[in-house]
Image (spheres, rainbow, N blue to C red):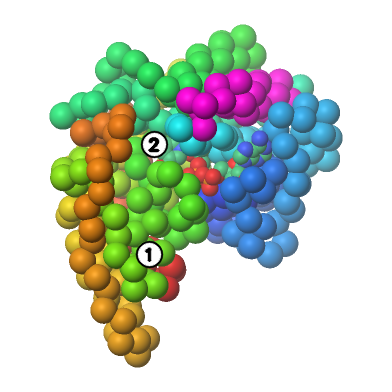
């Protein structure tokens, strides 16, 4: 298959490119490099430095690469920016998606898989949320992901296109940008490997479902290579396992300490410090991925401790 990965120079997109190549597919990336970097891509993979909001430029990419399938990861993904600039968010996440879908239809793409988000759709949940949990997005980012799913459903129905929206839990792994507002594992790794204390907001009892980027990339591959009985499906991609920030920071701290010791450094990683709770942070967010197991045969394969150890190694 020839697969175009939007946001392919980003964190999750570049893992998808890696796995496409490993599975013998051809891959190309479209990215405006706003948060992604070209160095994330393996050598030889074409990178079209194009903004998905630029309909004409994107059209030329579709003409030239002529993909059979698209993995759509490019997005504005800062919740706080979406609150400050809802139009900028919608421009990227809704209009950008429509450009991708229109060009997909025009050049005869068969499958589109697109990144959605479990956390922003389901809000606070104590038990792992299934796909039938009512979506209640409160930020413009959540609204744009929700509207995006509705457009995927519409295009799947209207055109002969198989569309899958993957509702990721909290994704972590190598190459995650440590300068964003999410990506707590990346932020912890970067600080602690430099001998700085990590910041934990509030009491740290914020429960999340951490899923490894390599597992998320595999879900993308399965979504475009599996023939589904429905033309549109939204599927959760997570582990259902609750981990709070206190547990997470302590695991990352011990892997960072171990890594520093192994490299001969005498840096002692300081204990984390506490800061004020962040307004709007969900107390608990977990997804149930039973449907992805049923229809794609997907399940998470990487235990959190293993994934964290690999991630620290990469940041080191
Ligand atoms: N990381 C998570 O925990 C998480 C959770 C839920 C959903 N998601 C979704 O997964 C997708 C990938 O996120 P990520 O974590 O890899 O972030 P990322 O910032 O590393 O990746 C996004 C990529 O898209 C590119 N991009 C952004 N706007 C663009 C535009 N207008 N035109 C072209 N390229 C553009 C960026 O340069 C970047 O390379 C996003 O759609 C995000 O909303 C991520």
Residue 211 pos. (x, y %) = 33, 47
What is the magenta range? 81-104
Residue 99 pos. (x, y %) = 70, 24
Relative height, residue 112 to residue 220 (above, below): above
Kindly identify which numbered label has been placed on residue 191: 1
Q: Secondary structure at mark 2?
A: strand
Relative height, residue 173 to residue 80 (above, below): below
Question: As rendered, which of 278 and 256 lies closer to the eye?
Answer: 278
Residue that extends furthest to the bottom in the rendered view of this protein: 264
Q: Residue at x 56, y 11 (%)?
A: 154
Q: Secondary structure at mark 1?
A: helix
Dominant secondary structure of the residues highlighted in magenta in the image:
helix
Q: Which residue is disc 2 drawn over?
A: 168
Could you tell me which quadrant the N terminus lies in?
Answer: top right
- Left or right: residue 278 versus residue 65 is left
Q: Residue at x 76, y 22 (%)?
A: 106
User: In the rendered structure, which disc, 1 or 2, sits on the residue that comes first in sequence?
Assistant: 2
Q: Residue at x 30, y 72 (%)?
A: 256
Question: As rendered, which of 285 and 196 lies closer to the eye?
Answer: 196
For the question of whether residue 85 can be seen, the reply is yes
Residue that extends furthest to the front in the rendered view of this protein: 276
Q: Is mark 2 within 8 Å of ligand 1?
A: yes
Residue 234 pos. (x, y %) = 41, 24
Could you tell me which quadrant the C terminus lies in?
Answer: bottom left
Q: How many labels sit on residues?
A: 2
Between circles 1 and 2, the one closer to the viewer is: 1
Magenta segment includes 83: yes
For the question of whether residue 214 can be seen, the reply is no
């Amino acid at each position: 298959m020839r697969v175009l990965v939007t946001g392919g120079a980003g964190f999750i997109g570049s893992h998808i490119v890696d796995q496409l190549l490993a599975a013998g597919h051809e891959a190309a990336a479209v990215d405006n490099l706003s948060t992604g970097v070209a160095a994330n891509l393996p050598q030889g993979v074409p990178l079209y430095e194009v903004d998905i909001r630029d309909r004409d430029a994107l059209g030329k990419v579709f003409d030239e690469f002529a993909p059979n399938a698209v993995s759509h990861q490019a997005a504005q993904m800062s919740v706080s920016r979406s609150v400050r600039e809802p139009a900028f968010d919608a421009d990227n996440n809704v209009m950008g998606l429509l450009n991708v879908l229109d060009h997909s239809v025009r050049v005869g793409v068969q499958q589109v898989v697109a990144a959605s988000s479990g956390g922003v759709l389901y809000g606070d949940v104590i038990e792992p949320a299934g796909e039938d949990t009512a979506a209640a997005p409160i930020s413009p980012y959540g609204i744009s992901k929700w509207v995006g799913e509705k457009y995927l459903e519409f295009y799947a129905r209207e055109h002969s296109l198989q569309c899958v929206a993957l509702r990721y839990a909290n994704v972590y792994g190598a190459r995650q940008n440590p300068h964003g507002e999410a990506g707590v594992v990346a932020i912890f790794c970067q600080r602690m490997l430099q001998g700085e204390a990590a910041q934990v907001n509030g009491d740290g009892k914020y429960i999340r479902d951490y899923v490894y980027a390599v597992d998320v990339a595999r879900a993308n591959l399965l979504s475009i290579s599996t023939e589904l009985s429905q033309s549109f499906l939204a599927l959760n991609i997570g582990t259902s396992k609750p981990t709070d920030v206190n547990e997470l920071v302590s695991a990352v701290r011990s892997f960072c300490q171990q890594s520093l010791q192994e490299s001969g450094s005498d840096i002692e990683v300081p204990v984390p410090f506490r800061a004020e709770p962040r307004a709007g942070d969900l107390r608990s967010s977990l997804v149930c991925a039973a449907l992805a197991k049923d229809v794609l045969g997907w399940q998470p394969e990487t235990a959190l401790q293993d994934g964290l150890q690999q991630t620290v190694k990469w940041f080191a």
